[in-house]
Image (cartoon, grey):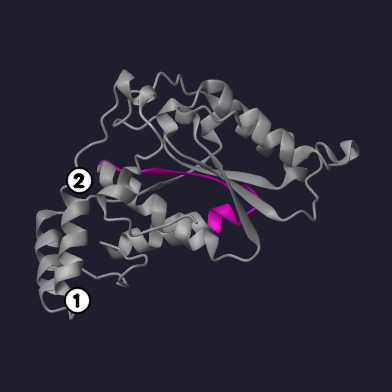
């Protein structure tokens, strides 16, 4: 196994293939069709690498991020309408733009409705001049209990899938960490990723406050979006 780059308090990769996935997602979000979904059979990979990607996107000087969280009542139409306020109506449908690329980061994706995804897809099909893309964990994931029906709205997204580590790869990774100068901290972080419990999705979630931080909280606040 080829171990990815390791950086304490920053992004790191369990597998070289995971590193390649992040690079693939970055290239997609800077391309002419900036719409990307993460997929994996291991839910904690999705949560963790989503924050890795957000961390890297924030370093891009020619990109800006927008956040949409349907779980806590965000109205996507208001977010998009605000971005469209200064667009010349004559540019609607045009693929030429000098606007800074913006990426909508969808949080709590299982709470998004079909209409939300259709609205995002309109940025690809009819409102290219806005120069807005989107990134999300795939809401059609087997881990989610979403009522999303699917359809064409998500078919335009590039899907990036993170492979599950084999037991042998996990063994090799732990052996690698045991020789690392910061082995204690690395062991703690990796153990939290590999043993993270699935997200609980019940009706009670709608009544919980914004103090819940998802994977960021479970991983000891490694990342910050501030």
- Badge 2 marks a residue whose secondary structure is loop
- Badge 1 marks a residue whose secondary structure is loop
User: Which quadrant, please, contains the N terminus?
Assistant: bottom left
Residue under label 1: 182
- Does residue 127 show up magenta in the picture? no
- In percent of width and height, residue 159 lies at 45, 44
Q: In the displayed structure, does residue 78 sit left or right of residue 112?
A: right
Q: In the displayed structure, does residue 194 sit left or right of residue 158?
A: left
Quarter of the image where one finds residue 13: bottom left
The answer, for residue 181, to whether it is visible in the render is yes
Instruction: Using the numbered discs, state the Cα–Cα distance from disc 2 to disc 1 in whole angstroms.
Output: 21 Å
Q: At 63% from the left edge and 58% from the top edge, which residue is drawn?
A: 63
Residue under label 2: 196
- In percent of width and height, residue 190 lies at 20, 59
Q: Are marks 2 and 1 in contact (CB under 8 Å)?
A: no
- In percent of width and height, residue 212 lies at 34, 39
Above or below: residue 78 compared with residue 211:
above
| Magenta segment boundaries in residue numbering | 27-41
- Does residue 36 show up magenta in the picture? yes
Q: At 66% from the left edge and 45% from the top edge, which residue is drawn?
A: 132
């Amino acid at each position: 196994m080829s171990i990815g780059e390791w950086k304490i308090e920053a992004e790191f990769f369990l597998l070289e293939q995971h590193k390649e996935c992040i690079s693939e997602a970055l290239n997609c979000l800077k391309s002419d069709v900036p719409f990307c979904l993460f997929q994996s059979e291991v839910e904690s990979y999705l949560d963790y690498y989503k924050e890795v990607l957000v961390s890297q996107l924030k370093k891009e000087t020619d990109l800006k991020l927008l956040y949409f969280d349907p779980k806590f009542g965000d109205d996507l139409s208001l977010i998009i309408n605000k971005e469209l306020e200064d667009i010349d109506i004559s540019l609607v449908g045009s693929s030429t733009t000098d606007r800074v690329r913006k990426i909508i980061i969808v949080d709590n994706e299982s709470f998004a409705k079909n209409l939300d995804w259709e609205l995002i897809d309109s940025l690809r099909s009819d409102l290219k001049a806005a120069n807005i893309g989107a990134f999300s964990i795939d809401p059609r994931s087997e881990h989610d209990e979403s009522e999303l029906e699917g359809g064409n709205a998500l078919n335009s997204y590039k899907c990036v899938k993170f492979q599950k580590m084999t037991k042998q790869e996990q063994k090799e990774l732990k052996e690698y960490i045991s020789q690392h100068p910061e082995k204690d901290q690395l062991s703690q972080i990796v153990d939290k990723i590999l043993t993270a419990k699935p997200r609980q999705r019940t009706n009670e979630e709608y009544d919980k406050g914004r103090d819940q931080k998802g994977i960021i909280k479970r991983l000891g606040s490694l990342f910050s979006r501030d």
